Amino acid sequence: MLIIGIDVGTTGCKAIVMDESGMPAGSGYWGYGLVTGTGGRVEQDPQDWIRGMTEAVRQAVEGLDPSEIGALSLSTQAASSLLVDEAFRPLTPAITWMDGRAVEQRDALEKELGGEFLYRTTGWISHASLDMAKGLWLSEHETDLFQAAAYFVTTLEVMNHFLTGAIAIDPTNAAMRQMMDIGTNQWHPSILKAAGMETAMLPPILPTGAFLGCLTEEAAESLGLHERVKVYNGAHDQYCGALGAGILKPGEAMLSTGTAWVVMAVSEQPVFSSSHISPGPHVIPGLYGALASLPAAGASLDWLKNNITGGSYAEIDGSVLCRVEKSSDLFFLPFLAGACFPSLNTNAKAAFLGMDLDTDRMDLALACMEGVAFQLRMALDEYESSGLMVTDLRVTGGAVNSLAWTTILAAVCEKQNIGILDARDTPGLGAACIAAVGAGVHPDYGRAASAFGKGFRRMDADTGLVCHYQRKYRRYLAKWLAMNLAEEACDRENNETPDLNNEQRV
């Protein structure tokens, strides 16, 4: 039997075909775009998800015997949501997880329900990009469409319905809508009421891996498959990525290094913290994920190369490590898109500290890599202080192509065993694991991940670099703290400054 894993992402759809032993048999990709607008709008045409999946799967199965394909499942972006009618025809564009229009609604819901209640119930602090706030925005600003809608759904439900006619979401995706109680995996009535949402507008929450049905005639024809292919309920892309990376036990974590860097760890119970680690149900019943995001971490090096250093990534990678001692007093605070974890400050700004006349472009590149690594170390330290010690950290994404960056990571994060994953498309592999277990090809996720995963190689930390970065990390923390305190002092001063236009001022 051949298995298909489909990853419906933010900017494109990937499909991979695997045989039972875990050997790849085909792959495909189809890209699509985003539509941005004023007021923080970031939208997407939901039909692009279906077109992207259709084209990616057709590429992946080209030359294969369709009768050998037995099952598929999905990895999807979460909290990209829209209103649909009874026939699942879109009434609105998809409001993506990057959209920021619902700030007023978020503030109102947090005031009514309480920020700590929302965090402890849903695993997420209140946020304008999540569906609780966006649903309220739709009810207030698109009232006619909201009243006419049959469902308020996300990517997974749109794809499940197209494939099988079933309407279902899984707990990993539902948690990121900020309307599900992660203790019960059910929609929370008080949150729905505050958001102006009826339970009937939301899909049933079925377990990850639940059998949804076989392909409809329309879906089978579109994908170039037969109608006997079984479809199993998928999961959110970070959770699928962790599954595809073999992150299945407490203490293990995946570091996904893209535009943002995301840490996904596994725990035996939900992990809450003052820094707002985001807990949620794992694909394996009884376990939980613990997620933290470092926005613009990978984008920092992209920005530096495109605007300052020039050259190629290969040039940067081959030039920076010989500058470690020279640049020992140079620091970079990687907050080009604000700070998120472990200290939320959307107004935080990036900065280079310690430059002199001898500083050159490759010194800046090294400081950029170090600054991102230090922020990751801060995140891992915060996990540990919250009761979750990460012992094994497996890295995937763009940073694995950089020997310099992974060498720095291994030295900065010396408490962890750093592994570089051989597989690149772990979300698709995770989706394939879900389908394989559902179809009985493998008895459990552990053995499916072992069969489908391509393993990893250990990064041995250089002893000299470990000592160097232990000292530099302590200095980085001091500078980071000093800048935070300075910003807070400025904010207090600005709040206390009298209004010069006040008529009472003489």
Image (cartoon, rainbow, N blue to C red):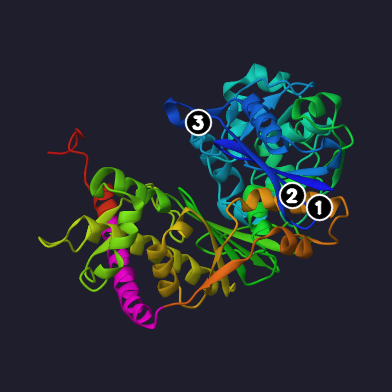
Residue visible at 16% across and 39% down in the picture: 505
Q: Of the two numbered discs 2 and 3 on the same chain, state the one appearing first in sequence.
A: 2
The answer to whether residue 164 shows anywhere in this view is yes
Q: Is residue 76 magenta?
A: no
Q: Residue at x 26, y 46 (%)?
A: 310
**Residue visible at 41% across and 74% down in the picture:** 411
List x then y, in percent, for residue 265. Answer: 61, 64
What's the magenta region? Answer: 462-489
Mark 3 Cα shell of 10 Å, populated few (<14), some (14-19), many (≥20): many
The part of the image, by quadrant, that contains residue 105 is top right
Taking the magenta stretch, the answer to whether it contains residue 469 is yes
Mark 2 or mark 1: name the one nearer the start of the chain.
Answer: 2
Circle 1 or circle 3, nearest the eye: 1
Which amino acid lies under the numbered mark 2 shown in the image of this protein?
Answer: Met
Residue with the mark numbered 2: 18
Relative to 314, is 33 above or below? above
Q: Residue 454 carries which label?
A: none
- Of the residues shown, which amino acid type is indicated by label 1? Ala
> For the residues marked 2 and 1, what is the alpha-carbon distance in whole angstroms?
9 Å
Q: Quadrant of residue 222?
A: top right
Give the image location of residue 476, x and y in percent. Answer: 31, 69
Please give left or right for residue 441 compared with residue 45 in the image.
right
Give residue 436's mark.
1
Q: Dot 1 lies on which element?
A: helix
Q: Would you call the spot at circle 2 few (<14 residues within 10 Å), some (14-19), or many (20 or more)?
A: many
